[in-house]
Image: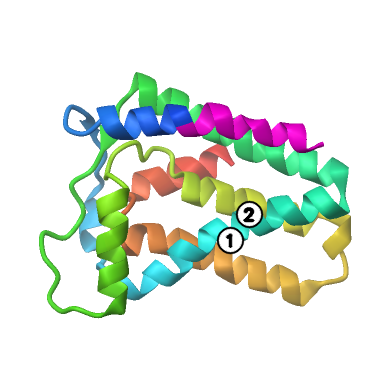
Amino acid sequence: HAWVLLYVFIYFPWFTYLEKHVTSNFNVIHTALDDKIPFIEFFIVPYMLWFGYVAWAVGYFYLKNKDEYFKLCAMLFTGMTVFLVISTIYPNGHYLRPAYFEHNNIFIQMVKWLYATDTPTNLFPSIHVYNSLGVHIAICNSKEFKDRPKLKLASFILMVSIILATMFLKQHSVFDVVTAFVMA
């Protein structure tokens, strides 16, 4: 059942194309609430944990429960495809990132690396938020975790932390987050 993962050969080239070509001429995503949310560099930690969270869930269900693996992949890949189509038809981005940082620490260095590698474009809806919701939904609905309330709680805390990180790091607008929730 690993064949499903061949989706990466669709997703990554398409995403890379958008990242390289949608850089300045885009529709600005912004809400008034975005201006009230502070930049908090410590949220780089849960933001980066997202990669492991999603990979762990896909790997776990791949090994433990083929039906739940297919359901999770269907949810993740459907949302990722909708995101790609939206970003292709409606190029989008934001100007939320701070112009400068008031201090320097390991978290700021990590944020600078993130900003250098991930443009503030192609944001709507947020894949970080959508996939975090998808993983948490899969964990909560899984027979494998039926009697594991602590694991479900840990997943919930990580999911919420990742979602907040997208806004506290100024990677996403509140609009991107809300639309990811609606889509999930």
User: Element under label 2?
Assistant: helix
Residue at 25% from the left image edge and 68% from the top image edge: 38
Label 2 sits on residue? 55
Counting every numbered tag in the picture gives 2
Q: Is residue 140 magenta?
A: no
Residue at 33% from the left image edge and 23% from the top image edge: 90
How busy is the neighbourhood of tag 2: few (under 14 within 10 Å), some, or many (20 plus)?
A: few
Q: Position of residue 92 (x, y in %)?
A: 29, 33
Q: Is residue 162 above or below residue 149?
A: above
Q: CA distance from mark 2 to mark 1?
A: 5 Å
Label 1 sits on residue? 52
Q: Position of residue 147 (x, y in %)?
A: 88, 70
Q: Which residues are magenta?
A: 1-12
Q: Position of residue 80 (x, y in %)?
A: 53, 35
Q: On the image, which quarter does residue 52 sit in?
A: bottom right
The foreground one among 166 and 109 is 109
Instruction: Say whether residue 47 is visible.
Output: yes
Q: What is the three-letter code of the residue carrying label 2?
A: Ala
Q: Is residue 143 above or below residue 95?
A: below
